[in-house]
Amino acid sequence: NAGVTQTPKFRVLKTGQSMTLLCAQDMNHEYMYWYRQDPGMGLRLIHYSVGEGTTAKGEVPDGYNVSRLKKQNFLLGLESAAPSQTSVYFCASSYFSVGTDTQYFGPGTRLTVL
Amino acid sequence: ELKVEQNPLFLSMQEGKNYTIYCNYSTTSDRLYWYRQDPGKSLESLFVLLSNGAVKQEGRLMASLDTKARLSTLHITAAVHDLSATYFCAVSDSNYQLIWGAGTKLIIKP
């Protein structure tokens, strides 16, 4: 049981480049989330999904897109990376909605945009 | 808009001492979570507190919730080096999204 996994672990991009972060979970969770963590701040929700084929905006969605084509996978895309998107990105999942259930986190992806 | 404040943001203490981390939030909520993050690692769930007066304990850590005061505390008893980490509280807002505190970086010196 791998839990929540993220690919890649590290990435360096140039401004304007695009990339996709992959999150996978093997716990059959309905809910999945993408957060970003910046120094000295708590996590901020980017987008989330309440089930396969559904996505919704979180607190800081601008500059990001997501897709949930399969229940176990949640993809986060950056179409045109900006230095302000330098951050550590965490994926999480939960069986029930965030308000009623603990979230399980992946190991994180450290992204640097030059 | 729900805001969550933790204090202190940084705490250095000696092994064997007791201390408390505070988590205040600005609007009504009935769920509060505590997570731990080791340097360079992911976040691990510690406690979920669901009602006023809730108290949870695990080893040297004890968390409590006062919904009327909009305050949760994480108490560390007889601290040991292994408890060095950053501790986050997170509160469920009216949209059932989690709003996170900035974290308390705890360093416990042998």
Image (spheres, rainbow, N blue to C red):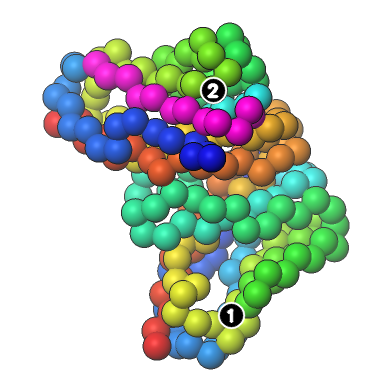
SS for callout 2: loop
Q: Which mark is residue B19?
A: 1
Q: Is residue A55 magenta?
A: no
**Of the residues shown, which amino acid type is indicated by label 1?**
Tyr
Left or right of residue B60, residue A25 in this image: left
Quarter the N terminus of chain A occupies: top right
Numbered range of the magenta stretch: A18-29
Left or right of residue B54, residue A28 in this image: left
Image height of B68 relative to A61, above or below: below
Query: Mark 1 against mark 2, which lies toward the viewer?
Result: 2
Towards the viewer: B48 or A95: A95
Towards the viewer: A101 or A38: A101
Image height of B82 relative to B34, above or below: below
Percent across and percent down for residue B72 are 70, 61
Q: Residues within 10 Å of mark 1 (few under 14, many from 20)?
A: few
Q: Residues within 10 Å of mark 2 (few under 14, many from 20)?
A: many
**Of the residues shown, which amino acid type is indicated by label 2?**
Gln
